[in-house]
Image (tube, grey):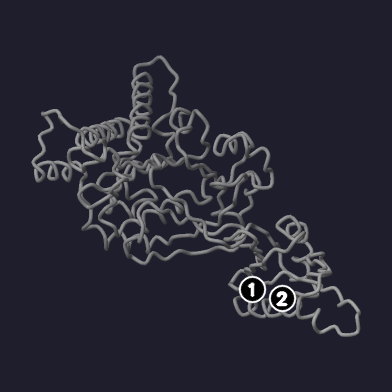
Amino acid sequence: MERISIRQAIRIRWGWKRLARMCGLSVTDKMPTALASLATSDGKEPKPRVLVPALKVTPDAFGVMAGATCLPKVGLVEFQKAAPYLADAWRMARVSVLPGEKPGQVTLRGVRVDPLITPTVHVPNGRPPEEYAVWELGVDEFGLPVVVPLKEVPGVAMGGLPGFGKTSCVNRLVCDWAPSPAVQFVFFDGKVSHAYEGDYADLVQRAFEFCGDDLEEANRKLKELVQLRRARSASIRRVLGVKNMWHVGPSEDWPLIVVVIDEAHTYFRDYKGSDPATKKLAALAAENARLVEDLVKKGRSVGFLTLLTTQKTTGDAIPTFIRDVCPVGLSFAQKTADAAVAALGDDIREWPDASPVTLQDPAYVGVAVMSQHGRPGFIRIRTPYVADRDAARVAEQTTHLVRHPSKLLEDLIHRTGVDLNKEDPEPPAEAA
């Protein structure tokens, strides 16, 4: 595939000056240069020069990436208008034009094959990530990598129809972060009773806790996490010397705790009924929602990251007081526009081409939609598939890194000699 792109890049370079003039991407300069003025001896004015933006083309597996320098009256808008003609001339499925890395430059991305319908596979390398809390999602519709920073992010809400890639997307995050001792995981899988029955059977040995669809067990484990959150909040200033864990970053002694709640509607369902059993389930579900709200709203600064996945991120599946405070939202294929709005917000109505409702075709399994950070609109992302054997390999290689954060906190407090029963008379300099 890259050889084909190389041949295309050569043709683009050779024919660029002619094609640019045909597409209106040129400007006529009637002012002669100093050298041309000196060379004219018969009194005639030099011929006007036709200037064409300089173009640098780089091929890759999906197509080409080109950088062009703008000219007067030939800028970003003119390149965007000419994009369809460039796509036809370059034999590309699509050409997009974006602002360049520097002022006065534009970036042209031409894709020969649609990355969204090209399945990809991710093989974890088993090495710790170079940077903490960075989620490499996949590639967008132009073949460019999509990276989402999760530093200082309290929660992620993810929706989509069954079998369209939600769990595989979470698996990649777990497999990429698992080799780091500064990250600990806890799984809540709402569609199974035991770990070996579900999608996290291969990864459970890397987690310090696992919970199935039992509401009482989930309630107990969520209470333990909230207690840990409170203990961290009470001790962080005297142990780490800061009020926000992200000022120093996660460490082996104070790890980032990733709470994965799959099929979240299982734990928050609003049970209706007057019999004692139903009332008990309704009370547990209401308390579970309150506990998760505590983790999402208060856990960011002490090192909690909560990932919630469900089929429809409507208020009955993930309560709005939880969903609406999750800064990052993704949606795989959805069946209705209301489900798409619940996952991505009202703005998705203004971008019908990017709506997850259009992703119901089997060719789009593994394709998600999310908002563009720093730019208006939405992007579609091809997330890779992570094989079960690769997930099992990573989990087995990193199982020795599992430590319960509560025990780590106790050891850290004991080692630093901090007495939590005494009030801190003077806050640390950085906190002040």
Q: Residue at x 77, y 61 (%)?
A: 82
Hey, which residue is sitting farthest top in the picture? 274
Q: 221 or 110: nearer the eye?
A: 110
Q: 402 or 153: nearer the eye?
A: 153
Locate residue 421, reporting x and y percent: 11, 29
Pick the quarter of the image with the C terminus.
Answer: top left
Type of amino acid under label 1: Val
Q: 101 or 90: nearer the eye?
A: 101
Q: Quadrant of residue 13?
A: bottom right
Locate residue 282, reporting x and y percent: 38, 22
Q: Closer to the N terminus: mark 2 or mark 1?
A: 2
Q: Secondary structure at mark 2?
A: helix
Q: 365 or 422: nearer the eye?
A: 422
Locate residue 160, reporting x and y percent: 53, 44
Q: Residue at x 60, y 73 (%)?
A: 58
Q: Quadrant of residue 387?
A: bottom left
Give the number of the disc on residue 328.
Answer: none
Residue 167 left/right relative to 349:
left
Question: Which residue is tagged 2?
Answer: 12
Pointer 2 local density, CA inside 10 Å: few below 14, some 14–19, many at least 20: many
Locate residue 169, reporting x and y percent: 46, 52
Residue 221 left/right relative to 98:
left
Q: Residue at x 35, y 61 (%)?
A: 130
Pointer 1 local density, CA inside 10 Å: few below 14, some 14–19, many at least 20: some
Q: Are marks 2 and 1 in contact (CB under 8 Å)?
A: yes
Q: Residue at x 73, y 80 (%)?
A: 14
Whether 378 is drawn above or below 11: the answer is above
Question: Which residue is tagged 1?
Answer: 57
Q: Mark 2 and mark 1: span between their CA atoms?
A: 8 Å
